[in-house]
């Protein structure tokens, strides 16, 4: 079986400061994924950005509560988001398929097996799955914590060798990244506790933050899957992680050897 990579791209990577989609960065990420495919990797993309896309597309002249906003903007934005990915990947002759999922689909049973079978047949036929939470129906207790959690579950489902979490910072630091004494933690051995360095804040446009990335990475490394946290705003980040990892800042969680 080919090496499988799950790449999660966060909202802060895909959005501009005004909250709208950054199409230029989307294009750069697609270019790099196309390169990975040429190196004979199978890739699954877990992409945030639907709500931001919908918010930038639709102007609402009356107040909506948080659930209504999430449902409305994600319903409108998911169409635009996947349409953009379709156009960008088509330039490389890559077929894409949309997978919208909920937490319920990861409970043991028929729904889990059906989703795994769907992902397997897509990958087996050269189709690149683009995965996101189904925000139109996932509310309150049905929601994933964020797409970090979702990407970890997907990595386990498809038996990926590595999960790459692209954020807007280089990885896990020993202090706030803006602090002069902050040092990037390059490698995290199994069972090493980084909780003293992890702050609970969420990202500006997404639901996640470094805490959720750390939780996902720790769980996956115990399952034997390597996890990399890196800065998706860095030019050519995915290619550099594969070709010259020692030269590019990132945090790598070393998996337990099974």
Image: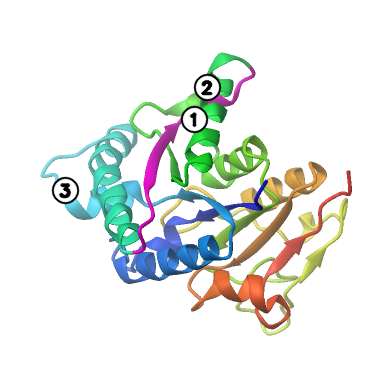
- Residue at which label 2 appears: 114
The residue where tag 1 is placed is: 118
Residue 165 coordinates in the image, percent (x, y): 59, 57
Relative to 207, is 99 above or below? above
- Marker disc for residue 172: none
* Residue bounds of the magenta highlight: 92-108
Q: Quadrant of the C terminus?
A: top right
Residue 98 falls within the magenta-colored stretch? yes
State if disc 2 and disc 3 touch (CB < 8 Å).
Answer: no
x and y percent of residue 247 in the render? 69, 83
How far is the residue under mark 3 from the one under mark 2?
Answer: 34 Å
Residue in the image at 64% along x and 71% along y: 241
Query: What residue is disc 3 on?
Result: 58
Where does residue 91 sit, x and y in percent of width and height?
31, 64
> Outermost residue, left direction?
61
The reply to whether discs 2 and 1 touch (Cβ–Cβ < 8 Å) is yes
Sequence order check: which comes first, mark 1 or mark 3?
3
Name the residue: 14% across, 49% down: 59
């Amino acid at each position: 079986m080919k090496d499988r990579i799950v790449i999660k791209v966060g909202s802060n990577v895909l959005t501009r400061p005004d909250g709208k989609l950054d199409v230029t960065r989307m294009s750069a990420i697609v270019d790099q994924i196309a390169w990975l495919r040429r190196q004979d990797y199978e890739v699954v993309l877990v992409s945030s950005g639907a709500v931001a896309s919908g918010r930038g597309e639709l102007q609402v002249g009356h107040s909506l509560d948080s659930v209504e906003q999430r449902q409305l903007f994600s319903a409108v934005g998911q169409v635009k988001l996947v349409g953009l990915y379709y156009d960008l990947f088509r330039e490389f002759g890559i077929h894409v398929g949309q997978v919208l999922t909920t937490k319920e689909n990861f409970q043991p049973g028929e729904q889990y097996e059906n989703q795994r079978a769907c992902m397997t047949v897509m990958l087996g036929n050269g189709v690149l799955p683009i995965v996101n939470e189904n925000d139109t129906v996932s509310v309150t207790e049905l929601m994933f914590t964020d797409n970090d959690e979702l990407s970890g579950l997907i990595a386990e489902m498809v038996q990926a060798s590595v999960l790459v979490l692209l954020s807007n910072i280089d990885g896990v630091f020993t202090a706030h990244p803006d602090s002069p004494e902050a040092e990037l933690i390059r490698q995290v051995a199994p069972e090493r506790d980084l909780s003293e360095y992890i702050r609970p804040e969420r990202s500006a446009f997404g639901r996640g933050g470094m805490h959720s990335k750390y939780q996902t990475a720790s769980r996956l490394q115990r399952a034997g899957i390597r996890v990399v946290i890196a800065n998706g705003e860095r030019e050519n980040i995915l290619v550099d992680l594969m070709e010259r990892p020692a030269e590019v800042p990132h945090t790598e969680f070393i998996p337990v050897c099974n």
